[in-house]
Image (cartoon, rainbow, N blue to C red):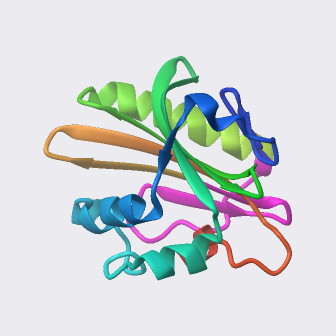
Amino acid sequence: MITKIGDFELGQNLDASALKELPLNDIVSTVKNAPSFMKNKQTRDFSEQDYKDITDIEKAYEVENLAFFGVNWNAFIATVGNKISRISTYYTTTDKDGADLIFRKIFIYVTNDMGKHNKNPFLSKRYIWYCDEGNVLVEKSSMWGQYCVGLVIEHNREGVHQSLKAI
């Protein structure tokens, strides 16, 4: 399973001194206010308690300009016990061809590492891989001339419901 994006790796102790911590209510607000095409039915009426229940994270941090696959991504790093448990990245551009290229590269990278995806909702560009160690999501979306490619990796831990399983 893919466990590393840029300088961050699942399970790594996080030195967050140079990162901006995000209060959980800010994350919930971001999810609630995201354009509808970026949300699924589980996140439409999201509360802070729902977020805590789904992710079981203790702290979240924002990372800007995370270099990966030759472009700069924005990322959210979630921790439990100061160890990275989830890395959510997204790359946004107005260049459709550029977004398509990054999406294909990421999709092939994950497929080569994990094999065929486990889930692909009908007519979507969202692909999910489940495995014992964790889960991976690759997706592409667009709206009003903006194209977004997302890559999420998360650890599975004993007794914890993981958010990608809910999608």
Picture mark count:
0
Q: For residue 125: magenta?
A: yes
Q: For residue 129: magenta?
A: yes
Q: Nearer the viewer, residue 44 or 127?
A: 44
For the record, the magenta segment spans 114-137
* Residue 71 drawn above or below residue 155: above
* Residue 37 percent coordinates (x, y): 27, 62
Which residue does the image show at 58% across and 80% down from the upper left?
53
* Residue 57 percent coordinates (x, y): 64, 64
Q: Nearer the viewer, residue 137 or 59?
A: 59
Which residue does the image show at 58% across and 28% down from the upper left?
18
Q: Is residue 98 left or right of residue 133?
A: left
Which residue does the image show at 75% across and 50% down from the upper left?
82
Q: Nearer the viewer, residue 82 or 75?
A: 82
* Residue 32 drawn above or below residue 49: above
Which residue does the image show at 84% across and 60% down from the upper left?
133
**Outermost residue to the front:** 17
* Residue 166 percent coordinates (x, y): 56, 78
Q: Is residue 75 left or right of residue 80?
A: left
**Outermost residue to the top:** 70
Q: Is residue 152 left or right of residue 33?
A: right
Q: Quadrant of residue 39?
A: bottom left
Q: Is residue 162 left or right of residue 45?
A: right
Q: Quadrant of residue 96?
A: top left
